[in-house]
Image (cartoon, rainbow, N blue to C red):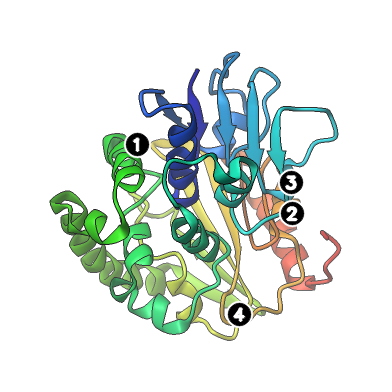
Amino acid sequence: MRIVTRPDFDGIVCAVLLSDIVGDKIPIIWAEPNAVQNRQVEIKEGDIIANLAYHENCSLWFDHHLSNQISRPFNGAFRIAPSAARVVFNYYKRKFKRDYGELVKETDKIDSANLSLDEVFHPENYAYISLDMTIHSQNTADESYWNRLVRLLGDYDISKVLDDSGVKNRIKKAIRKNKEYVRCLKAYSTREENVIITDFRPLKKTPSGNRFLIFCLFPEANVNVKIRYHDRDRDRVIVSVGHSIINRSCKVNSGKLCSRFSGGGHKGAGSCSFPAAQAEKNLAAILDTLFQNKGEQK
C-alpha cells in the first residue's frame, strides 16, 4: 500500500489525512498530474490516489478536478469541491485521531485561490499561506521536505509547524524569492486582451514564487497562461492556465480546456503538457479560446 498524491499544499494535506487513517509508515509517492495521465508512474494494487487522475490499478481514489471525473464504479470519493483534501476529510469524517477542520478549511481557501489582495502581497503575515509558499512541485529534490511537512502537520498545530527551524528558513527564503519572482514576471509576461502570457521558455531554469502575484501586476486581465519547458527536457512544454483572483470574469473552464491537450484540472486552474514541436499550434488554440471567453468549456 502506498499513498500517491501531488506535491502541492492540497496534496500534502491529503497525505496528512490519509496517513492518519492508514498509518504514518505508509510510503508516499509524489507525482505530477501529467506523469500519472501519461502512465509514467506505476500504480499498484493497494495504492491510494488523491488529488490526481484515476488509475484502474488503485484501490482507493479521491479527487475534485472536473476533468478527472469518471463514470465507472470505484472505491473512494469524487466530488467537485474546493480541494481534494475536503473530499478525503468528508469521506472519513470522525475517524481521524485529530481535528483537522482548520487545516482543511485553509486548504480549501488556498487551492481555490479564494484570497484577498493583502494575502497575496503579504503572505508572510498568514500562517497557512506562508507555509504554502515553501512548496514547489517542480523541485523533486524537496521530496524529503514534503514528507516532513506531512509528519509535522499530522502531529502539531500550525504554530508549532511554523516554529520548526527548517520551515522557518524556507519561509524566509520564499519571501526573498518572491521579490525576485516579481522581476521575472515583469520581464517575461505580457498582456494580450484579457490574457496574461508568461513565457519562461527563454530561461534555463524556470523561476518559482507566489503564483497569484501575476494577477496583481495585471489586474485588468482575467486569466494567466504560463509556459515553461518540462524540467531539463526541452522537448516538452508545460502550459498552466489559471483564473485571476482579482478579475473573476473568465468564463472558460481551465480544466476542460487543458483536457483537450491531454491535461486537466478544475474550473479555475488547469495544466497540460505536449511536445515542443506542437507548442505554437496548441498555444494558439488555447489563447484563442481564452480570448473569446465564451464559457464553452463548462
Residue denoted by label 3: 67
Residue denoted by label 1: 140
Along the viewing direction, whichever of 217 and 19 lies nearer the viewer: 19
Going by the image, does 108 lie left or right of 289? left
> Which mark is first along the chain, 1 or 2?
1
The reply to whether discs 1 and 3 touch (Cβ–Cβ < 8 Å) is no
Characterize the local packing of mark 4: few (<14), some (14-19) or many (20 or more) Cα atoms within 10 angstroms. Answer: many
The reply to whether discs 2 and 1 touch (Cβ–Cβ < 8 Å) is no
Q: Distance between the residues labelled 4 and 3?
A: 24 Å
x 65%, y 63%: residue: 268
| Dot label at residue 257 | 2
Residue denoted by label 4: 221
Q: How far apart are marks 4 and 1 (CA)?
A: 32 Å
The reply to whether discs 4 and 1 touch (Cβ–Cβ < 8 Å) is no
Q: Distance between the residues labelled 1 and 3?
A: 25 Å
SS class, disc 4: loop
x 31%, y 59%: residue: 158
Q: Which amino acid does label 4 sit on?
A: Ala
Q: Position of residue 150 (x, y in %)?
A: 35, 41
